[in-house]
Amino acid sequence: MNQEQSEIANSLGRKYQLLEAAFTDLACDAAQFHSALLVHDMPSRDLSTALSRIVAVSEQLHVGLSRLRQDVLAVEAALAGPEDAAWANHIEGWLEAWLAHGSVANSRLH
């Protein structure tokens, strides 16, 4: 693997992690706000509906992000040297545990 390919693989991994972290924060915040919201008038009902949609779409996007993670890891593995492969396996295990934790948090909402 040359230096340019290594930089591309690392960039994909970092960008994916930022995307997933931002998405997870958004989904968790929306779910917490939704569960604490008291619906007592039309504006609060509209807010509840919007938050419900965010939570529902987040569940669908979670599946897409899981597939995207697999593709990013495949690119990194294809371009990795032997020392990077061990590091990638460690990160993959951490990401799987993190994603499993996110799925449990989302499933508790329903």
Image: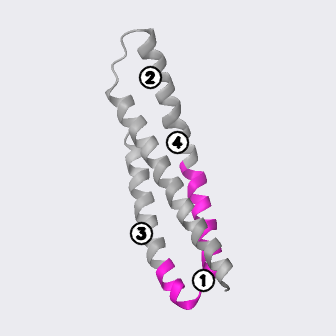
Q: CA distance from mark 3 to mark 2?
A: 34 Å
The mark lying in front, picked from 1 and 4, is 1
The alpha-carbon separation of the residues under discs 1 and 4 comes to 31 Å
Q: Secondary structure at mark 2?
A: helix
* Label 1 Cα crowd, 10 Å radius (few <14 / some 14-19 / many 20+): many
Marks 4 and 3, how far apart at CA: 21 Å
What amino acid type is highlighted by mark number 2? Ser
Q: Name the residue type under label 3.
A: Trp
Instruction: Return the residue at label 4.
Output: 58
**Above-or-below relation of 89 to 46:** below
Tell me, yes or no, whether the two marked residues, 4 and 3, touch with CB atoms within 8 Å.
no
Q: Which residues are magenta?
A: 62-88
55 shown above or below 67: above
Marker disc for residue 80: 1
Disc 1 from disc 2: Cα separation: 46 Å
Question: SS of the residue at dot 1?
Answer: loop
| Label 3 sits on residue | 94
Residue indicated by mark 2: 48
- For the residue carrying disc 4, how many other residues have a C-alpha within 10 Å: few (<14), some (14-19), or many (20+)? many
Image quadrant of residue 13? bottom right
Which callout, 1 or 2, points to the residue nearer the camera? 1
In whole angstroms, how far apart are the C-alphas of marks 1 and 3?
18 Å
Q: Which mark is residue 91?
A: none
Q: Quadrant of residue 97?
A: bottom left
Q: Amino acid at mark 4?
A: Ser
In this view, the residue in front, 54 or 84, is: 84
Task: Tell me what residue is drawn at x 44 percent, y 77 percent.
Answer: 90
